[in-house]
Amino acid sequence: MVQIEGSRRFGALTEARLAEFEHQLSARLPDDYRSFLLEHNGGAPNPDTIDFVMEGQPNSSDLRYLCGIHNGEYWASLTKHLKTFGARIPAGFLPIGHDSGGNQYLLGLEAPHRGRVYFWDHEMEADEGEVPTMENMSLVAESFSSLLGGLREYEDE
């Protein structure tokens, strides 16, 4: 079972503040992700390794931190991540967390990707001035709950 270390490190989240964030996004967050934010408002999952397929090859990465809605540190804030990455990621996605290398985990907010979680490789992002596409993204999980359920301990290979 996944433990969230540093849960509510930057404070608890109220339903009213969450609704305000969703209003700013013009989107309601998936229920499982809303529940996570209301319970933990960010934190570091343990275990933290997730497996996925990238460009047809098995891959894995860590999920170092899941962001929350608060005025805390940049690396832990959904609003600050959205400000930094919003124009760099495809429309309809929200950067919800990151790995140790600065790659992002994106949550789909619109059909057909709604609720799904993707790995966004910053090394392959669109050039400045180009419209971001999904070419540098890999599906990680069908839902936020599946993402948490798919985390495993890191094994030195």
Image (cartoon, rainbow, N blue to C red):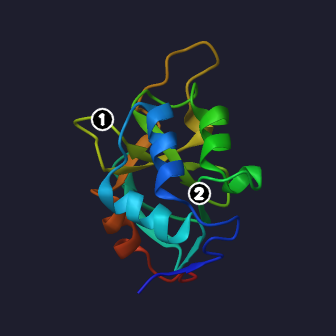
Task: Name the residue located 37 percent from the left edge and 36 percent from the top edge.
Answer: 27
- Which numbered dot is residue 68? 2
Disc 1 from disc 2: Cα separation: 20 Å
Q: Residues within 10 Å of mark 1 (few under 14, many from 20)?
A: some
- Judged from this view, the residue extending furthest toward the bottom is 1
Q: Is residue 31 above or below residue 36?
A: above
Q: Secondary structure at mark 2?
A: loop
Q: Is residue 122 above or below residue 73?
A: above
Q: Is residue 5 above or below residue 59?
A: below
Task: Name the residue located 49 percent from the left edge and 17 percent from the top edge.
Answer: 131
- Which numbered dot is residue 110? 1
Q: Nearer the viewer, mark 1 or mark 2?
A: 2
- Judged from this view, the residue extending furthest toward the top is 129
Task: Inspect the image, locate mark 1, and give the three-letter code of the amino acid beneath it.
Answer: Glu
Res. 114 image quadrant: top left
Q: Where residue 23 sits: x, y (%)?
A: 45, 35
Task: Name the residue located 33 percent from the left edge and 49 percent from the top edge.
Answer: 56
- The residue closer to the viewer here, 10 or 108, is 10
Task: Name the residue located 48 percent from the left edge and 71 percent from the top edge.
Answer: 39
